[in-house]
Image (cartoon, coloured by chain):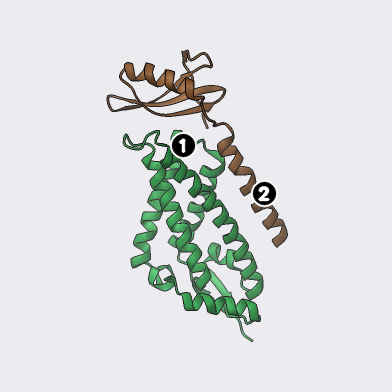
Amino acid sequence: MIRKIAVAALALTVLSAPIAMASEGMVEAAAQETLTAQLTAEGYEVRQFKAEDGLIEVYVVKDGKMEELWFDADLKQIEHEEDEG
Amino acid sequence: MMSERVRVWDPLVRIFHWSLAGAFLANAFFTRPGKEVHQWVGYAVAGLIALRVIWGLVGTRHARFADFLPMPGAVLGQIRDMATGRRHAHEGHSPLGALMIWNLLLTMAGLAASGYAMTTLTFFGVGWVEEVHQVLVVWAEISVVVHVLAVVGESLRLGVNLPKSMVTGYKTLP
């Protein structure tokens, strides 16, 4: 009984960490520089880059509004929504 | 020896416990971070903690913080009990249990606070806030696992069904 609960609990813990991080990654420095320059010129404050769903997600703020912008591998801005959950 | 059935956990403590457990489970495994459902569950956690803090001051005997303040001496006593096979069941939280409750309350409060911070203009997209939130998630998961194992272990060691007491409100003490 205890062993079963222990195994289940540990399995959940071990499995959950990768789920949270799996889809996120680093964005190349060159891409970050290009996008930062471009977005700053457009009046955005760039907060963070993430590689997600094979795209680049950029956290930006403009005129007190928080937004996530998405770019493809060629740094073209695209419409994208994270999966609803 | 006669066993004694003692009322220990009032309904608010029990509803709080299972609601918090459900909310944490939901946000750790089922809702997607950054989405509205995840945020609403987070607000619910904050509300639950706030309610519990008030109840910790004015609630029933074993619900009060004063009943389970961290007591190093008592903690050592409980560890000594475990090592020497002496059975001493506690009506309310055991000394080690109390430490876990404080840990979980503070961790959940930290999760709610860091999660909320990410939705504010000041901390939106700020990396370290997100990292704090993620580290707290892992810490909370480890704590929950230890909590569950300890509850099961102590139930067997003491012959008191502790999970059941968090459902019915009563402990049957030997």
Mark 1 surroundings: few (<14), some (14-19) or many (≥20) residues within 10 A: some
Task: Give the chain of mark 1.
Answer: B
Residue drawn where x is 48% and y is 68% of the image: B98
Please state which amino acid type lies under the numbered disc 1.
Val
Image position of B64 with respect to B130: above or below: below
Q: Is residue A63 left or right of residue B112?
A: left
Rendering quarter of residue A19:
top right
Q: Dividing the image into 4 quarters, which one contains the N terminus of chain B?
A: bottom right
Q: Which residue is mark 2?
A: A11
Residue drawn where x is 37% and y is 18% of the image: A37
The picture places residue B19, in percent across and down from the top left corner, at: 48, 52
The picture places residue A20, in percent across and down from the top left corner, at: 56, 38
| Chain letter for the part of the structure drawn in brown | A
| Chain letter for the part of the structure drawn in green | B
Task: Give the chain of mark 2.
Answer: A
Residue drawn where x is 52% and y is 30% of the image: A26
Q: Which mark is residue B70?
A: none
Q: Which residue is mark 1?
A: B37
The picture places residue A13, in percent across and down from the top left corner, at: 61, 49
Residue furthest left in the image: A63
Q: Nearer the viewer, residue B164 or B36?
A: B36
Residue drawn where x is 56% and y is 51% of the image: B141
Image position of A48 with respect to B149: above or below: above
Image position of B41 with respect to A79: above or below: below
Q: Is residue B173 visible?
A: no
Please state which amino acid type lies under the numbered disc 2.
Ala
What element does badge 2 sit on? helix
The picture places residue A3, in percent across and down from the top left corner, at: 72, 59
What element does badge 1 sit on? helix
Q: Is residue B119 visible?
A: yes
Q: Nearer the viewer, residue B116 or B128?
A: B128
